[in-house]
Image (cartoon, rainbow, N blue to C red):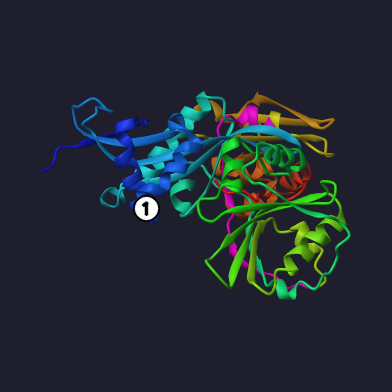
Amino acid sequence: MPAPRSVALSPLTETDWPRWSHIQSLAFGLDPGDWTRFRERLGDDNLWTLREAPDGQPDGEPDGQIIGGLGVYPLGKWLGGRRLELAGVSVVGVSPGSRGRGLAAGMVAESMRIYRGRGAVIAGLYASTRTVYRSVGFEVAGEKYIYSLNPKDIGLRSRELSCLELPAGDPATLALLQRLHRPDHGNLDRSAAIWDRILRPFTGVATVWVFGAAEGYAVVCREGHGYPYSWRLADVQFHTARAGRQILSFLADQRSMCEKITLSGGGDEPLLSLLPEQIWKIEKEMPWLLRVLDLPAAFSQRGWDCAEGEVSFAVDDPIFPDNSGGWRLTVQAGAASIARIDPAGAAMRLDVRALGPLLTGYALPSGLAARGLAEGELEQMRASDRLFTGPRPWMRDYY
C-alpha cells in the first residue's frame, strides 16, 4: 500500500513554474505559454503551489510533487460606497490524477488564512462548482450576466458627440479611463492587473473609443478572424444619456461587418436600458461568490445608505473561530458598528455562508431563512430586512 502523503500550500518559485503552468493547462484547457501574462499580472507573491510529499518528509520540500495551485488578486470591492479589501481567488487547479480528494477546498481555505493575514476582510471568486466552495463558507453574493445582441437590431442613430480612438497601450489612456470609471455597488476597485486584463486581453486586441468631452468610453475586443467577426465590450462607461445612445449608435454602425456584440453587466445594465426594444439575449449567468474573512471589519467598513437600526445574530465559523459567537450590528448615520454579545440572546442564527450575501445585500435575512441559511423568528428577520435593502450588487469584471 502506498505511504500516506501530506500536502501543503507554498509560494511559487522559479523552478515551480513549468510544472505549475502544466497543471493549470490541464485543468483549464489552455496551453502552458498562455499563463505567462497571468504570471506577469499577479506576480509570484500571489501564485501558490500545492505540494504532496510522503509522510515524514517536511511539507514543501523541493522534491515534493506539485499537484495543484492557484492565484490570488489583491483587490478592493465597493460596498455601500466604501472600499473593502478583497482577496480575489482565481485559477484553482488540481492535477487530473489528484482530484476527488478535497484538495481544491483545502487550498482555498489555506489561501484565505494567508490573505486575511495580509489585510483582506473578504474573499471572492467565480465558481465552476458551488459545492466545493460552499464547503469552505462561500455563497453567491452578487450578479453578472453575459448579454449578446446583433448590431443590426439596435435601431439608434445618435451622433451628437465626437468619437475618438485612443491607443490602448498609452499610459495617458489608462489614466483617462481610470478617471472616468465610476464603480457601483459590488464593483471592483480595479487594480493594475484588472485594468491590464481589460486593455491587454489574453486573446485579440483591444481598442479604446472615447465619446465627446470624455462623457463616455467603450473598450472593444474583436473576437474571430476575418469577416464576419464579433465584438466584446470589455468595458463601457457613460455619464450622460446622450453618450450612452452614441455608444449604441457606434455599435450599430458596425453592422455590415460585425454579427454579434457581447457585454457583461448586472441585471439592470444601463446601456441596454437605452435601447428602444428588448433585442438582447442573456447568453450566460455568472454569479460571483463571497466569503467573509474578518466579520467585524467587513460589516463595520462597508457603507450603509439610509436605513438605521440594529440586528443581532450568532454564527459558527470553523475556519476563522474568532468570527464565531454572537454579534450586534448597529447602523446609524450611514455607518455601522458591531459588538460582541451573548449568542444565546441573538435574534438570528446564521450559517457562515449567509454572511457574504448578507454583507452585499444580495439576500435579506428573511430570504436567507428560506434558503436554510438563517434561523429565527420570521417577523424579526423581516424587520431586519430594511437594514440590508439597497442596490443589487453586480460586477462587470472577471478575475
Q: Amino acid at mark 1?
A: Asp
**Residue at the image position 31 percent from the left and 51 percent from the top:** 100
Residue 74 image position (x, y, % from top left)? 55, 33
Say if the magenta span includes residue 158: no
Which residue is the site of mark 1?
31
Residue 255 image position (x, y, % from top left)? 70, 73
In the orientation shown, which residue stands out farthest toward the left? 1
Who is closer to the viewer here, 339 or 55?
Answer: 55
**Residue at the image position 35 percent from the left and 48 percent from the top:** 32
Q: Quadrant of residue 194?
A: top right
Who is closer to the viewer here, 303 or 382?
Answer: 303
Residue 192 image position (x, y, % from top left)? 60, 36
**Residue at the image position 85 percent from the left and 39 percent from the top:** 306
The number of discs equals: 1
Q: On the rendered image, what quadrant is the C terminus found in?
A: top right
Look at the picture and state if 22 lies above or below 107: below
Q: On the rendered image, what quadrant is the N terminus found in?
A: top left
Q: Residues within 10 Å of mark 1 (few under 14, many from 20)?
A: few
Q: Is residue 51 visible?
A: yes
Who is closer to the viewer here, 314 or 253?
Answer: 253
Which contiguous range is marked in magenta?
277-299
Who is closer to the viewer here, 38 or 273?
Answer: 38
Residue 347 image position (x, y, % from top left)? 68, 38
Q: Secondary structure at mark 1?
A: loop
Give the side of residue 131 with respect to residue 194, left or right. Answer: left
Q: Is residue 94 visible?
A: no
Look at the picture and state if 12 lies above or below 350: above
